[in-house]
Amino acid sequence: MNDQHYIDRLDTIAANALKDSLPVYAKLVAVLKEIIASSTNETHAKELIAKFESSKLMQKLSFHFYDVLHTCDALGRSNIVDTDIEASKIANIVAKEIPAMLWFVCDDAPVKISFDLVPKDALKYLQEKSIKLAGVELEELKESVKQSLIKAINDGKTFAHFKNEVDAVFDQYGVTNLSQLHLETVYRTNTFAAYSIGQQNQFKTMQDRFPIAQLIGIHDARERIEHRLNEGYYNPSTVPIPPYDYNCRCTIRYIHISQINGKEQPFWESPPAPSAIIFDQRDSM
């Protein structure tokens, strides 16, 4: 599975997340507009807004976004694992074993879903094993939930998509608008950050397999020259983790031990254009 496949899935997740969040955001904006329209002056408007109970809408929006970030984090982790498997196979060496990870806590515990996992491993587990849902005895219902999750993983969907599908299955059985471009920037910057952090976290458990990292830009008309200056090889623990500026599309390729040719010359201390790094994903997302 190549890097571009993962980037394409990341784009799809970001687009779906933006689409799903817009109705919640629009409802919040509409309510705030009504409050402003009913006020007599700016001071009155501020007083009314301060009293507005927006917690439910904001909570819904934040939970949705949180699920998206976890999904993208898992996608980044999966990229590192798959790279090791494929490169090791070509080099005829043993791939690093990843502990078995289950998406469902079965038996006497309620169903529990986590995206801090490798989707490929979880998918294989679900395909080969049956699942148990506490309080659910109908085998047909269990299988429907299982297939919904498999589909969500296969299609690169978020937890929100999966939850909506499962809810449907269970039902069957018994202020100033931000521009679209602004919203897209927020989502894409953060989803790509989650993907990069996922890669970095997975790399930490596989440092012996990936001793060098390569920062790569997108060579098109939109690429900023200062970002291209930072391209090159790095110590994986010091490489700038993209996106390090708004709308940054740079990516990191962690180079497998079997892919090193000896010609790599890493920037061991600092990137050539450090002023281009507006924020570092190691500090915050």
Image: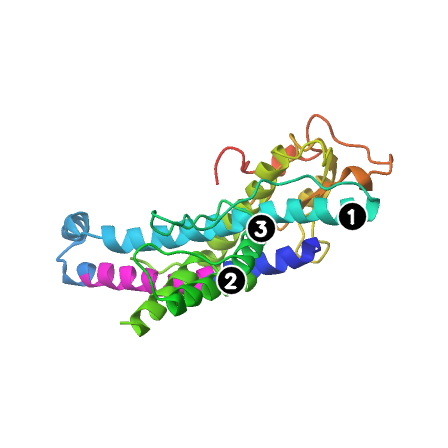
Residue designated by label 1? 89
Mark 2: few/some/many CA within 10 Å (<14, 14-19, 20+): many
Q: Is residue 18 magenta?
A: yes
Q: Give the extent of the magenta segment.
A: 17-34
**Measured from the top left, where is residue 3 in percent x and y?**
69, 53
Q: Image check: 86 left or right of 35?
A: right
Q: Secondary structure at mark 1?
A: helix
The answer to which image quadrant residue 177 occupies is bottom left
Q: Is residue 261 magenta?
A: no
As displayed, is residue 9 above or below residue 235?
A: below
The answer to which image quadrant residue 206 occupies is top right
What is the distance, in whole Å, between disc 1 and disc 3 at their CAs?
17 Å
Name the foreground residue: 48 vs 145: 145
**Measured from the top left, where is residue 254 in percent x and y?**
70, 41
Residue designated by label 3? 121
Q: Image check: 103 left or right of 39?
A: right
